[in-house]
Every structure is written in C-alpha cells, then in structure tokens.
Image: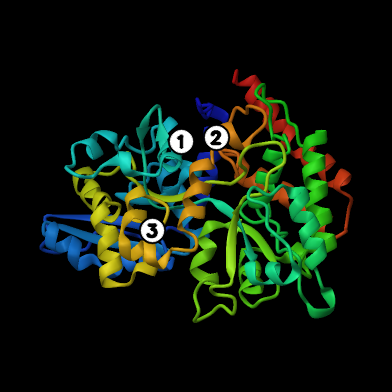
C-alpha cells in the first residue's frame, strides 16, 4: 500500500501541535561520563520496557563504549513528547519507541531512518524472523523503519468451563451473530454477570480499537479509495448498531465508561462469559496470582461478518530519528533490545512469562516459552498472521491500519468520533445521530485529501 504523503498544510499543523507539546519536554542532555558515546532512549513505562532497563548490564558488557540514558514516560506522555521531538527536529532522542501508527507516516516524511541496511549488516539479526504482518506494518517501500519490541492482535476469550456447563460450543470461526446469540444466553444481570465485555469508553485507542475491526468486517470504511468519508454508510451503521445493541442486551454495566482496564478486571474476576480484545490480555487473565479464571479460558479468532478474519495489529517498536548524531550506537542498542538473544535473556533472567510477545516467530519455538504460553500461543499467532487488510476488510481503503486510520488527523478525528459512539452506548443519542455527527467530523478531512491530489 502506498501511504498518502503528508501535504504541507497538514505538516505545518502537525508540527505546530508537536511544538506545543515540546514545551513540556524535559532536558535530556547527556551527562559527563567515561563512555565514548551517550545515547538518549525514550521508551514507554510499561513492565516489559522496565525489564529492558533492568537488563542493561548485558548491553554494557557487549558495548562498553556506549552509555545509555533512558527517558521513561507513561504511554500518553511518551507519545506526545516523542512526537514533539521527532516532528520538530528537536534532536533530544537517539532512539524512540513508536508504533505501527507512526512508523509509515514518519518514514514518508523523512523523520526516521531506514533501518533495513543496518539490520542486513548485523550478523544473525534476521528481520525475516519478524512476524510477517508486524514487519509489513513497520515498513515503508519494502524496508523496515522501526523494528518490533513486541506485537499484538485481537481475539475472543471465553470461559470454556461455563460453556461446557451450559452445553454451548464456541464455533471454530465465530461470527458476530453467533457471539451475540451466545452472549444473550449467558448474560445474567441479577448476578452481575455479563454475557460479553466490550470496550465502550471514548478514545481512539479505547472503544474505536475493537469497534473498528467490527466496522471492517461488516464492509464499512472511514474513507473509501477516493477519499470520500463513509461513516454514515449502511455498512458502518449496521456494525455500530450491532455493537451497541450487544452491549445494551448482554454487556457489562456502565459500558459507556468501560475500557480495557475495566474489562480485564471484570473478566479476570469471573464476571463475564466472553471478552473480545487485545491478545496481550493473556498476561493478566492467565496469571493465577491475580485472576480467578486462570486456566479456565479458551480462545477463538476475532468474530467476523463478511471477511475471512477481523483482528487488529499493533506493535511497540524502536526507531532512530533522522536528527540523531549517534546512529551507529543507537542501532547497537536497538538491535540488542529486539534480537533473538534478548528474548532468551528475559526468559532466563526474569521469567518466561515476561518475554515480549508477538515480535519474532522464533520466540514461539523456545520450549520454555511454549510451555508457559500453551493455551494462547497458537491463537495469538493465528490472529497476528491474519491481521491484514486483504483478509480483514471488504473494500479497499487509501490508508494503512486496521484499528486506526493511518493519517495524522486520526488522533483528533478518532477521539471525536469515539465520543459520539460512547454517547450512543450510554443511550444519550441514537446510532443514527452519532454517525451523522461523525460524518460531519470526517468530511473536511476527506476534502483536504481530495484537494491534495490523493
């Protein structure tokens, strides 16, 4: 897919937004030390990234002339500050943690370096080992511009024990109609038990993540191939209506304010029969220290309607800003943190359940990891291999992405549309009213891309 270049008015607007965010940037000048070079690495503050920081002695032993200074921030703050720095050419960072949402856009704008030549010149690094859909999502014109630390898709988890008790069999490839029928049968509000948990909380990364995959499999689009806004199409209306009705009939209480965290807590505490969401859920729901349903679940592919598959695709990855003055050292660090040996280092030093999932195919061939991930390894890989537009969308679109639209404007557009969807879930307006307003939000953006000759 050719990504639509960011034309100048959009670039200026994007840079202006980034510049405002940059005002909050903490100074990251390298401290004096005996190392030959100091690189500044900006990463997200989640457990697996913190594990990487804790394992720095291994990197230092292999690269004694490189000193690493970490800037570790919560996800929303990290995304804003990294975007601000890279988009404005601030040069504060030598390595940045981004995702497949940013990678292709930033590569097209020349904001990050092509990593393919560096990867090819590194013995044993093996980019062919990356899960293919993840590699494609992090590539531009056939070359990788960021490399995956971990990746995820989406699937449907369900209480296998309760299904057996009720005499219900989960279809091998469930449709949304079948999922809806099962959810309504198992729903029991009198016991605070939901037939299914689905995100309803406003946010382009909250309700829109699962809902966009429903829209895709129903044949809907945000924009068609000619950049016409399509949020008020019959296909989108059907997808959103079924999603909203399912939550009204068999979803969790307070669904309009329920996000990923609420669903993971509800399902883990035995208060839902099913949950459709990120494959990364397994680290919580299968943890016997915190989950009441560990070992009681099975996994099915993302529900479909008119497509072969319907999952999403997301990856936290590492890139080198074009402004870095320490690119060789930056690649030394990136290749260390995303190499096959790093996976084994985490497993042996910290624990196999902490291994970053979904980046390399070889991870799933390690016996120790295979034993820990027995219940969900194959469903995770199947979901990730199937997460591509050719099998998860009915009609072609001019943008990359499955659970997002890969254009700069989507962060704002997706948030505003999600607020309309959340209002419909809350019963504050009808689906028709919500989508009518969503269409009005999308049309000016569609027009700008038409005028730009896309």
Q: Do the residues labelled 1 and 2 touch (CB within 8 Å)?
A: yes
- For residue 160, side relative to residue 247 (left or right): left
Q: Which residue is drawn at 80% across and 33% down?
A: 233
Give the spatial CA distance, label 3 vs label 1.
Answer: 19 Å
Q: Indicate which disc, 3 or 1, sits on the residue closer to the N terminus.
A: 3
Q: Residue at x 72, y 34 (%)?
A: 219
Q: Quadrant of residue 394?
A: top right
> Where residue 218 sits: x, y (%)?
73, 38
What residue is shown with label 3? 43
Give the spatial CA distance, label 2 vs label 3.
Answer: 24 Å
What residue is shown with label 1? 104
The C terminus, quarter of image: top right
What residue is shown with label 2? 400
Characterize the local packing of mark 3: few (<14), some (14-19) or many (20 or more) Cα atoms within 10 angstroms.
Answer: many
Q: Which residue is drawn at 11% across and 56% down?
A: 65
Characterize the local packing of mark 1: few (<14), some (14-19) or many (20 or more) Cα atoms within 10 angstroms.
Answer: many
Whether residue 420 appears in this view of the structure is no
> Where residue 200 sits: x, y (%)?
73, 59
Q: Do the residues labelled 2 and 3 touch (CB within 8 Å)?
A: no
Q: Do the residues labelled 3 and 1 touch (CB within 8 Å)?
A: no
Q: Residue at x 72, y 41 (%)?
A: 305
Circle nearer the viewer, 1 or 2? 2
> Where residue 80 sits: x, y (%)?
50, 53
* Vertical side of 400 occupied by 250: above or below: below
């Amino acid at each position: 897919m050719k990504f639509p270049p960011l034309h100048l008015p959009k670039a200026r607007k994007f840079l202006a937004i980034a510049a405002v965010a940059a005002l909050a940037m903490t100074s990251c000048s390298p401290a004096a030390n005996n190392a030959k070079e100091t690189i500044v690495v900006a990463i997200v503050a989640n457990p697996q990234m913190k594990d990487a920081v804790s394992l720095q002695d291994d990197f230092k032993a292999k690269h004694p002339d490189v000193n690493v200074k970490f800037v570790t921030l919560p996800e929303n703050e990290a995304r804003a500050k990294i975007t601000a720095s890279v988009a404005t050419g601030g040069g504060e960072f030598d390595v940045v943690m981004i995702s497949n949402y940013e990678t292709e856009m930033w590569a097209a704008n020349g904001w990050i370096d092509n990593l393919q030549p560096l990867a090819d010149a590194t013995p044993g690094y093996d980019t062919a080992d990356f899960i293919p859909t993840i590699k494609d999502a992090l590539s531009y014109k056939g070359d990788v511009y960021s490399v995956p630390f971990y990746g995820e898709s989406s699937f449907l988890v369900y209480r296998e024990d309760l299904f057996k008790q009720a005499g219900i069999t989960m279809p091998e490839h469930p449709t949304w109609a079948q999922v809806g029928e099962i959810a309504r049968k198992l729903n029991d509000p009198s016991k605070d038990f939901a037939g299914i948990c689905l995100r309803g909380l406003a946010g382009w990364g909250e309700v829109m993540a699962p809902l966009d995959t429903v829209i895709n499999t129903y044949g809907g689009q945000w924009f068609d191939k000619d950049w016409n806004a399509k949020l008020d199409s019959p296909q989108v209306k059907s997808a959103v209506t079924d999603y909203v009705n399912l939550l009204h009939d068999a979803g969790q209480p307070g669904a309009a304010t329920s996000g990923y965290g609420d669903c993971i807590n509800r399902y883990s505490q035995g208060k839902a029969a099913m949950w459709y969401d990120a494959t990364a859920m397994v680290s919580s729901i299968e943890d016997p220290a915190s989950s009441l349903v560990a070992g009681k679940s099975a996994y099915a592919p993302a529900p479909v309607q008119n497509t072969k598959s319907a999952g999403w695709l997301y990856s936290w990855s590492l890139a080198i800003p074009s402004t870095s003055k320490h690119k060789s050292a930056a690649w030394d660090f990136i290749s260390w943190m995303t190499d096959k040996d790093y996976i084994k280092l985490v497993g042996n030093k910290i624990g196999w359940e902490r291994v970053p999932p979904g980046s390399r195919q070889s991870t799933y061939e390690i016996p120790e990891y295979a034993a820990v991930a027995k219940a969900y390894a194959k469903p995770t890989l199947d979901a990730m291999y199937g997460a591509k537009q050719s099998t998860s969308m009915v009609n072609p679109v001019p943008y990359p992405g499955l659970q997002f639209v890969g254009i700069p404007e989507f962060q704002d557009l997706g948030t505003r549309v999600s607020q309309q969807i959340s209002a419909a879930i809350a019963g504050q307006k009808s689906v028709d009213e919500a989508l009518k307003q969503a269409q009005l939000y999308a049309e000016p953006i569609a027009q700008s891309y038409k005028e730009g000759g896309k």
